[in-house]
């Protein structure tokens, strides 16, 4: 199957700082990527849809000025958590849509963000 | 929007027994239903999926059934093994692909020896 790599795997940052998370499709081009948030022992909640070359589409209740998404190439989408606060601590996970066969979504390994 | 409910939240079975996890969805327009397995600290991985034009799909020990009228779908794992222990998520989307998935709340399956 296709490989999606997310970096970093974990990050600790101070309150008020910004953190950038990268999501890369290693062996395929992904015009569409998705960013999810997962709280401990809970489900994945879709935050936004990242489209290459255009603005991201955010789900209701997700602050687009706080969670900046950039999809500048067909293999890279970035999520920047701006002015992070402890309540932003969570597991962030991306997926990339592989449209070669059956349109399957492949997930990155996730990034655990801890804001102190 | 879509709402997906999943039951049970935890499930413990003995090795060799079968496990069944059930999900219901609210949006009748949903037409793609994947199941993901997530081991602790790892990424979700697709184990099986079904589209609305099919009632049942099987892949070795794993099967999924879909009842469009009742708007529910189920995951069946037969002859469970310890390595089946993980969290399983059902999901639904309306465009026939894995775009903009709405996930269920997850089921923690524990297969005991």
Image (cartoon, coloured by chain):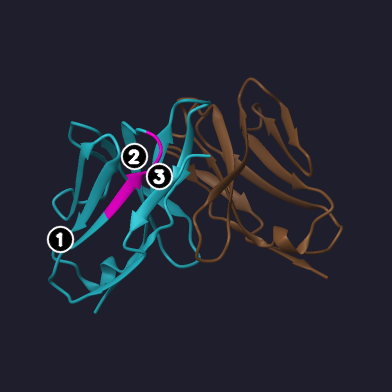
Across and down, in percent, residue B5 comes to: 56, 48
Q: Nearer the viewer, residue A112 or B30?
A: A112
Task: Please tell me whether mark 2 or mark 1 is closer to you in this view.
Answer: 2
Q: Nearer the viewer, residue B101 or A6?
A: A6
Q: CA distance from mark 2 to mark 1?
A: 20 Å
The circle on residue A33 is 2
| Residue at (20, 55) in percent of width and height | A80
Q: Colour of chain B?
A: brown
Judged left or right of residue B62, residue B5 is left
Q: Which residue is mark 1?
A: A82
In the orientation shown, which residue stands out farthest toward the bottom?
A: A116
Q: CA distance from mark 3 to mark 2?
A: 6 Å
Find out whether the residues at labels 3 and 2 contact each other: C-beta distance under 8 Å: yes
The circle on residue A95 is 3
| Residue at (84, 63) in percent of width and height | B15
Q: Could you say whether the residue bearing mark 2 is in a helix, strand or loop?
A: strand
Q: CA distance from mark 1 to mark 3?
A: 21 Å
Task: Please tell me whether mark 1 or mark 3 is closer to you in this view.
Answer: 3
Q: Which residues are magenta?
A: A22-28
Across and down, in percent, residue A79 comes to: 24, 52
In terms of sequence position, does the residue under pointer 3 or pointer 2 come before the other?
2
Crowding at mark 1 (Cα within 10 Å: few <14, some 14-19, many 20+)? some
Find out whether the residues at labels 1 and 3 contact each other: C-beta distance under 8 Å: no
Across and down, in percent, residue B85 comes to: 69, 62
């Amino acid at each position: 199957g296709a490989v999606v790599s997310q970096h970093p795997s974990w990050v600790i940052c101070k309150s008020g700082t910004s953190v950038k998370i990268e999501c890369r499709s290693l062996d395929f081009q992904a015009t569409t990527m998705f960013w999810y948030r997962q709280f401990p022992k809970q489900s994945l909640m879709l935050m936004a849809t990242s489209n290459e070359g255009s603005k991201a589409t955010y789900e209701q209740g997700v602050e687009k000025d706080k969670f900046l998404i950039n999809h500048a190439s067909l293999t890279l989408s970035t999520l920047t958590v701006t002015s992070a606060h402890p309540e932003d601590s969570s597991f962030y996970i991306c997926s990339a849509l592989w449209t070669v066969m059956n349109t399957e979504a492949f997930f990155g390994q996730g990034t655990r963000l801890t804001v102190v | 929007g879509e709402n997906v409910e999943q039951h049970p939240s935890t499930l413990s079975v003995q090795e060799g027994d079968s496990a069944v996890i059930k999900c219901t969805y609210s949006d009748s327009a949903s037409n793609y239903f994947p199941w993901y397995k997530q081991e602790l600290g790892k990424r979700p991985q697709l184990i099986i999926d079904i589209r609305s034009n099919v009632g049942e799909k099987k892949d070795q020990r794993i099967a999924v059934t879909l009842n469009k009228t009742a708007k529910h779908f189920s995951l069946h794992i037969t002859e469970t093994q310890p390595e089946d222990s993980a969290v399983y998520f059902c999901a639904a989307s309306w465009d026939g692909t894995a775009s903009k998935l709405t996930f269920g709340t997850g089921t923690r399956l524990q297969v005991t020896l």
